[in-house]
């Protein structure tokens, strides 16, 4: 399939989908209006017409987190830079609105030629910069028609995505050739993009911009106060298990139960990858006989130092049921587990969030999506690989039971993150060297 064929097919599909969305938009559905590009970035107050913005697209929460350090670096270099941010998901838009309201976040329009043209006419961007793995042929073609330069930032292609893209090789090759510059995370990504037909002279490796996400390390007093507010007993070691996927919950709970035989005071914060699995997760926790409480119901006034666990409202496991809490929760723990790594289907989630907060990380063997980051943490001694519940519990007991074990591992994790930093600065340098301005 080539670009012209794709645009013809999506145009035909749009003939069926657009009337439905138009009806929803007419009834006041703001999301439908954004998908059809009848609405987009909100207007900003000011005198005169706004400057043409640089349009950054980030699919969902993870991509938003990757783009934010780049946007921050641009704003550091040019105060008042005109920037807008789109996302593919509503949750991604919610995070972008919270973290970057000045980017006037909105939903990415349907990848249908007529809608893409309308979006570009409405926004009139000076450039379109796409994060990570997003390739939208109709939008890429419409940008080419208008002379809007394209850039890929923080690009990556997993082995699974690479195999899928090879099945539509001519279309992918034509799309990649439209980019003025492609800035990717690793040499492995560069090799995969080259194999798919990206021009080699436009490909650059800059590292993972997520590493540069701003991290506010809590001081010990603030950390202790937050733990008390969440009902975590003073002195109780805490495991934070984040982004737990289906098929991993039983392993995590088995490991927690085994570790508690050696460390009875151990508590856990447990965050399923998606909030629609909170009830299922809670049921699994309760079926094991653990005391569970949802994160949204766990905020207590700080308890006096002499209060008992019961007075502090202690639970064995806190289940995260609200968006945007996990990164901060990682900083409360003595150890973390990052999900998506115990099941071959998922390929792993970001281990840098806990590591950057000085929390050592346990990882399963399936890490293809985060290979460079996890390898760096493992090599530095800031992470350990575990393959089953027994190995998981053993590593946890080693860190929490040895004198200063988790402190040293956490220090090594932070050092590894520091060595990986700087990707946002390198990315903006490469963009500006390729003619992009703000």
Image (tube, rainbow, N blue to C red):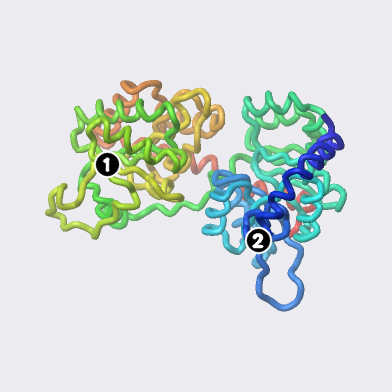
Q: Is residue 422 visible?
A: no
| Callout 1 secondary element | strand
Q: Give the spatial CA distance, label 1 vs label 2.
A: 47 Å
Q: Horizontal and vertical percent for residue 225?
A: 27, 56
Give 422 or 97, whichever is nearer the viewer: 97
Residue at point 39% right, 41% down? 278
Left/right of residue 347 with respect to residue 231 in the rendered view: right
Q: In the drawing, does residue 338 fall left or right of residue 399? A: right
Query: In this picture, is 50 found above or below 64?
Result: below
Q: Which residue is mark 2?
A: 77
User: How many badges with numbers are in the image?
Assistant: 2
Q: Could you say where residue 314 lies in the image, as x and y percent from the top left?
A: 21, 46
Residue sitting at 43 percent across and 40 percent down? Answer: 355
Would you place residue 207 above or below residue 436 in this image? above
- Residue 327 horizontal/vertical position (percent): 43, 47
Name the residue beneath numbered marker 1: 292
Decide if residue 324 is in sight here: yes
Q: Residue at x 34, y 49 (%)?
A: 295
């Amino acid at each position: 399939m080539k670009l012209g064929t794709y645009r013809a097919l999506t145009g035909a599909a749009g003939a069926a989908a657009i009337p439905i969305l138009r009806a929803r938009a007419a009834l006041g559905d703001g999301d439908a209006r954004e998908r059809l590009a009848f609405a987009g970035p909100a207007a900003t107050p000011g005198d005169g017409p706004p400057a043409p913005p640089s349009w950054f697209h980030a699919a969902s929460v993870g991509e938003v987190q990757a783009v934010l350090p780049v946007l921050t670096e641009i704003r550091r270099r040019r105060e008042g830079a005109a920037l807008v941010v789109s996302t593919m998901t509503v949750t991604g838009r919610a995070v972008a609105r919270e973290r970057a309201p000045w980017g006037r976040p909105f939903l990415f329009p349907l990848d249908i030629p007529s809608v893409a043209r309308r979006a570009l006419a409405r926004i009139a961007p000076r450039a379109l910069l796409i994060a990570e793995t997003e390739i939208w042929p109709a939008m890429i073609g419409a940008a080419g028609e208008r002379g809007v330069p394209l850039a890929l930032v923080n690009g990556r292609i997993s082995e699974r995505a690479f195999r899928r893209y090879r099945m539509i090789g001519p279309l992918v090759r034509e799309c990649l050739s439209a980019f003025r510059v492609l800035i990717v995370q690793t040499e492995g990504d560069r090799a995969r993009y080259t194999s798919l037909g990206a021009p080699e002279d436009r490909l650059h490796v800059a590292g993972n911009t997520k590493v540069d996400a701003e991290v506010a390390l809590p001081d010990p007093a603030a950390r202790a106060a937050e733990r008390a507010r969440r009902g975590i007993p003073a002195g109780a070691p805490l495991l934070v298990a984040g982004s737990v996927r289906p098929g991993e919950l039983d392993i995590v709970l088995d490991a927690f139960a085994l570790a508690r035989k050696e460390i009875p005071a151990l508590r856990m914060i447990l965050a399923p990858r998606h909030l629609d699995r909170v009830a299922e997760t809670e049921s699994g926790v309760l079926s094991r006989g653990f005391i569970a409480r949802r994160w949204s119901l766990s905020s207590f006034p700080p308890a006096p130092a002499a209060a008992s666990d019961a007075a502090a409202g202690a639970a064995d496991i806190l289940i995260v049921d609200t968006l945007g809490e996990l990164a901060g929760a990682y900083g409360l723990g003595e150890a973390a587990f990052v999900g998506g790594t115990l099941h071959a289907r998922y390929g792993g989630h970001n281990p840098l969030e806990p590591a950057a907060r000085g929390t050592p990380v346990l990882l399963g063997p399936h890490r293809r999506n985060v290979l460079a980051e996890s390898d760096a943490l493992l090599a530095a001694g800031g992470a350990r690989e575990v393959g089953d519940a027994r190995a998981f519990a053993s590593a946890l007991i080693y860190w929490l039971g040895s004198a200063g074990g988790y402190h040293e591992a956490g220090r090594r994790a932070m050092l590894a993150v520091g060595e990986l930093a700087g990707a946002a600065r390198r990315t903006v340098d490469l963009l500006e060297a390729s003619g992009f301005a703000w």
